[in-house]
Amino acid sequence: MTDRRDTFGAATIAALIALALAFGAQRGRQTAPATARAGDVTMLGGTVAKYTLRPASGRIEIETADSASRLEVEMSLIVDGVERPLVMRRSDLHLKDKNTLAAELPIEIGEDRAAGSFELRMDPASDLVSASLGVVQDKGMPAHSYALRMSLPLEGRNVFVPGVGQVGDVTSVDAKSVVLEDDVHPFGLVSTQGPLSIVEEPPDTDQAGARPRLVATAKTEGANAGKRLDLSIVAGTSSQHFWGRLYRVIHEPVARVAGVVTGTKERAHVIGLDEEGRPQVRAIVDAQGRFAIEAPTNALSWYASLEAVHTSAPVRFVPGTPWDLRLDVSAGGELHVRLFDAETKQPVIARLIVKGIAGTLDPSFGPDFRASGAGPLMDILEGEVTTPLPAGKYRVSATKGLEWNVESEELEITSGHTKSLDLAMHHVVATPGLVGCDLHVHARPSFDTPVTPEDRVLSLVSAGIDFAVPTEHNVTGDYTPAVGLLDVGKVFAHVNGVEVTTFNPRFGHFGVFPWSGTNVPPYRGTTAAAIITHARRVPERVVQVNHPRLPQGIGYFTIANFDPRSGRIPAGMRADFDTIEVYNGYEAGQRHLVERVMEDWYALLNLGKHIYATGSSDSHRIMYQWAGYPRTYALANDSGTMDTKEIVAAIKKGHSFVTSGPIVEFEAGPNKARPGDEVVVKAGTPLTAKLRVRAAPWVDVTAVDILAGIPPQAKDQVGTVVSVYKKSIPSTHDVVRFDESLSIDLPAGARWIIVIARGERPLDDVLPFMPIQPLGFTNPVWIAR
């Protein structure tokens, strides 16, 4: 018989053991690192922030330790240039070790299959989180290229690219890292495998909650290349403490820079530049104006800024110097400028550009979306302005677009004094009979721009634009109230318009004008046929394909799989629109992108499509992306008045040319056929023509080229485009660059000709932020045999 005391004792011992085990387990949970467990919480925790992976959506959610900042990062895989979400099954996610989440995922490429190996790992020493992807293709698969991409909403944060500086919505740069700043906790995306491709893109639909996003794409690799695709995220405890962490990740030496900003009670930013003047660091001071930064050792010149016109003088200061760096942002003097027409002496609505010289920094008159002051630019409505400026030396310039000379003068501002300047502006390229048009431009109520309609109209008039179309996303744009408020109706005209921004499915953007009423063409769950049919209810309207090759899934030609070398139009692709935006402002700085769309256009012309080219800015801001560059000139002002119906009709008929600088005038045959017209040419007889190219002195023109299109002679053959005249032009500052009568031998079968004028020297030596090589081209003159 068992003794009851033995039973009690055994039970007591068992209970004590269970209690000890429970205590030990609880204690183990309290001391274990905050790592993920598959099927439970997919989280990696660091000192600065915690990172939660959502495998089903390929999203990383970041929250700082103090819960002051949150960020969502969407990961995607780029296969042969096509983006797809990086999604995993939750059941496939597992802990590789205490600091690494891992998963295997299949990658389907048509009928091909590849295996992906994903890891999200945290380095406890640096608090750096890295996403890594390896791809292994099945044997016998054709070669494919792969890249890893991260995109994240800006949420009001500034974008700073080390080596470039603060950037705006036209951003398209390559760099090792990019930083999102909110003056609390900066976040950086970093690549250690080579430069990232960095694009700041606007939201693409009017979907509720759509936000501008930053997109960073890592270096492209082929499968089985022995390397993994890596992209890393670094978070900072503060603006000042972030930079040392960032530069250590990319293995660049750092040293301490400490000091104080004086002359203000506001919290200034401290900026460090390298020897070439490229910003490498941008940090905010504390409430007492002090700062202590671990900066890259190549940041040798420093200044302080208040995000307005007040900046300190630049100071050379080597990181690691043991004494304080003192930067003073005390007020300087004032600049008073008067702009007037040199001939009439009347005030001119124009753009003022103030650039620092001789070591003086560029001023900033305001954010990049305000016409009254965007960085170093100001659009002057009354022809006169007075503004504070830090003491220093400046080059002050005034411009009013392609037809006017740029007037400049250098001066010095001294503390407590006003410097007055008169700039007489010269209209050097007279354009009677021509109307300068921007047919694709944005302001409110478009969801992806903060520019007001008043600021947009002012920016257009100051750029010398005569006629514009407010092409807002899926909303009717109307400048009537803004034109009335600014009182510019005598020099500026417009018609209402809309940019049909397709959604679910996304297959491109389409400009439609004139447009009236609040009901816009169908854009959600629609087709190109439905959009065109709806727009054509009014025959006089223009239906245009906007930026047909723009990436990120918004280029109609790319989505429709149009191949200009195939000799055919893909089944299901509608090609009965009126115009193509061949020259778009987002692509203007990369001529090869414009030339690619020109090839699309040539192919459609050779397929018998009477589709005409346009050029427009697609501007969403004031700075970086100038309204009016490029532009379309309509041949529609012979009466000396701006009749909007006549202008729209000219654009629809191709009576126009496109340019970012050269003014191209072309007439052919005895009937003096101009672009959009037809000329009869007898077989074996040369075509007589008159070509004149003019440009303002600051616009470079170095060559003219006349191309002829020969349609395919049989089904599925490819048409050809040949040069029938080409000539180099000396680079001069004369207004008339080329003026000759020509006799052109046309090849057999030619059905159209166009003229192209090109320049080599970019425009940004005069117009900041515009690395555009001048380009102008006519619409076709049709050849009848």
Image: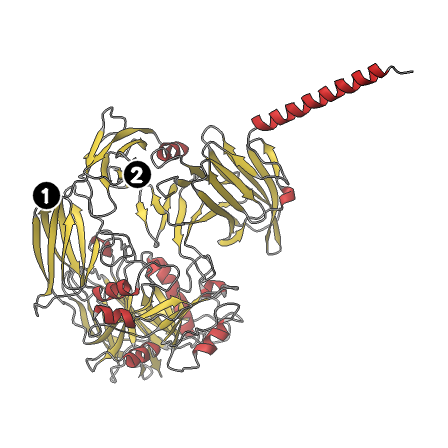
Q: Nearer the viewer, residue 694 or 134?
A: 134
Going by the numbered disc 1, the residue's amino acid type is Ser
Residue 146 left/right relative to 155: right
Between the residue at mark 1 and the residue at mark 2, the CA separation in whole angstroms equals 25 Å
Q: Nearer the viewer, residue 493 or 724?
A: 493
Label 2 sits on a secondary structure element that is strand
Q: Nearer the viewer, residue 532 or 445?
A: 445
Asked if residue 137 is positioned above or below residue 525 in the image, the reply reads above
Residue 176 left/right relative to 384: right
Q: Position of residue 300 (x, y in %)?
A: 24, 33
Circle 1/circle 2 CB separation < 8 Å: no
Q: Which mark is residue 284?
A: 2
Q: Which mark is residue 415?
A: 1
Asked if one can make out residue 279 in the rendered structure from this viewpoint, the answer is yes
Q: Position of residue 273 (x, y in %)?
A: 26, 38
Asked if residue 776 is positioned above or below residue 325 in the image, the reply reads below
Most extreme residue toward the front is 4
Q: Quadrant of the C terminus?
A: bottom left
Q: Quadrant of residue 20?
A: top right
Q: Which mark is residue 3?
A: none
Q: Quadrant of residue 239?
A: top left
Asked if one can make out residue 224 in the rendered structure from this viewpoint, the answer is no
Q: Residue visible at 79% across and 16% down?
A: 9
Q: Quadrant of the N terminus?
A: top right
Label 1 sits on a secondary structure element that is loop
Q: Residue visible at 46% across and 28% down?
A: 125
Bin the neighbour count of mark 2 within 10 Å (Cα to Cα): few under 14, some 14-19, many 20 and up: many
Asked if residue 287 is positioned above or below residue 55 in the image, the reply reads above
